[in-house]
Image: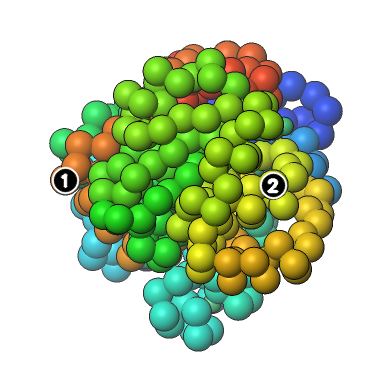
Amino acid sequence: MGVMRTVAAYAAPSATEPLVRTTIERREPGPKDVLIEIAYAGICHSDIHTVRGEWGAQQYPLTVGHEIVGVVAEVGSEVTRHRVGDRVGVGCMVNSCRECANCLAGVEQYCLKGNTGTYASVDRDGTITQGGYSTHIVVDEDFVLRVPESLPYESVAPLLCAGITTYSPLAHWKAGPGTRVAVVGLGGLGHMAVKIAHAMGAEVTVLSQTLAKRDDGLRLGADHYFATGDPATFETLANSFDLIVNTVSAELDLEAYLRLLALDGTMVNVGAPPEALPIQVFTLFANRRSFAGSTIGGIRETQEMLDFCAEHGIVPDIELIAAADINEAYERVLRSDVRYRFVIDIATLA
Ligand code: NAP
Ligand code: ZN
Ligand code: ZN
């Protein structure tokens, strides 16, 4: 396994206990590796699903976090893409097989052998990957992104998951001038979807449980805002969207939302509740509707998204917290009380 170094981290001791400060091991950088001193790490709802075992059993202790921004502290002898001192980012994956059809097509997130997740995945040395709630991480240079310095350092981390996860389907299904896009759920992913779809030129509608965040939604770039708690919303908006991006982390009545799609419209699920969600094919027959899934984005597309956000001045709305506040932040995410992403100041962990 080679030489390791011990670094500070926050980890879940089990599926049911709060996260605690601890230490974890990082490998010494190999020839192609970059050692990153982490400055900020976002809190994604996937972190919570994972540590609580909602997506399947995990090995504990487990450190999560896959919205990582920091500075290159060391590079291996064969590294060419990054230099010491560069501002860089790491998202949801740290490796893939690099030889399957999907990897060769530049969509490593769909690696046919399964990409190596930034946490809770089996790494090539057989250890379980540990994520960004820690002071340092060692990553193969090909999975490290350049983070434009024009984007504010403490706010940029959520682009590495929430940003790319919404950018990728919006780009794939061609959100732009003349398209009517609905975003379901105004949380971490949802608020990025609104900003990005607006910047792409689409007409954007937020579908949130209540009208409580209406002013925010319009400020973020939405043209319209409706409460899904009001049954009239589903009548008013029937057959009216070309694309619906569903970011909801819980079970949802998909049928009700599918009926909002216009001719040839697509509803793409990026929300990842553990439960199976039923669909009647007859709802898809009407208007020749599609139901699709999408997960994160490839490395090339993630770089494209970062550069797009720099060009358009798109910055996540964040609440900066100390590491000691992670457990409280989790509770707030679970109550949909997040505006709109928690980011951990890793300096408070060192
Ligand atoms: P989040 O910040 O908690 O946002 C989720 C939003 O969904 C909430 O703010 C809330 O919006 C809405 N919501 C929550 N519970 C609901 C319920 N019972 N009924 C209706 N709406 C509800 O979470 P996130 O970090 O954006 O992640 C969202 C989901 O995407 C999670 O399941 C996460 O694991 C998944 N995810 C997937 C990928 C991928 O690659 N596909 C990547 C990242 C995350 P309102 O208050 O506006 O209603
Ligand atoms: Zn995520
Ligand atoms: Zn592959």
- Expressed as whole percent of the image width and height from the top left, the position of residue 95 reads 50, 64
Does the image show residue 16?
Answer: yes
Q: Is residue 243 left or right of residue 126?
A: left
Give the crowd class for mark 1: few <14, some 14-19, many >=20 residues within 10 Å.
Answer: few
Residue with the mark numbered 2: 256
299 sits to left or right of 335: left
Q: Name the residue at 30% across, 55% down.
A: 178
> What residue is disc 1 on?
311
User: Residue placed at 26% from the left, 37% from the top?
Assistant: 314
164, above or below 101, in the image: above
Residue 243: percent from left, percent from top: 48, 56
Residue 65 pos. (x, y %): 55, 38
Ranked by sequence position, the earlier of labels 1 and 2 is: 2
How many residues crowd mark 2 within 10 Å: few (<14), some (14–19), many (20+)? some
Front position in the image: 341 or 198: 198
Q: Is residue 276 above or below residue 19?
A: below
Residue 5 visible in the current orientation = no
In screen coordinates, is 113 left or right of 33? right
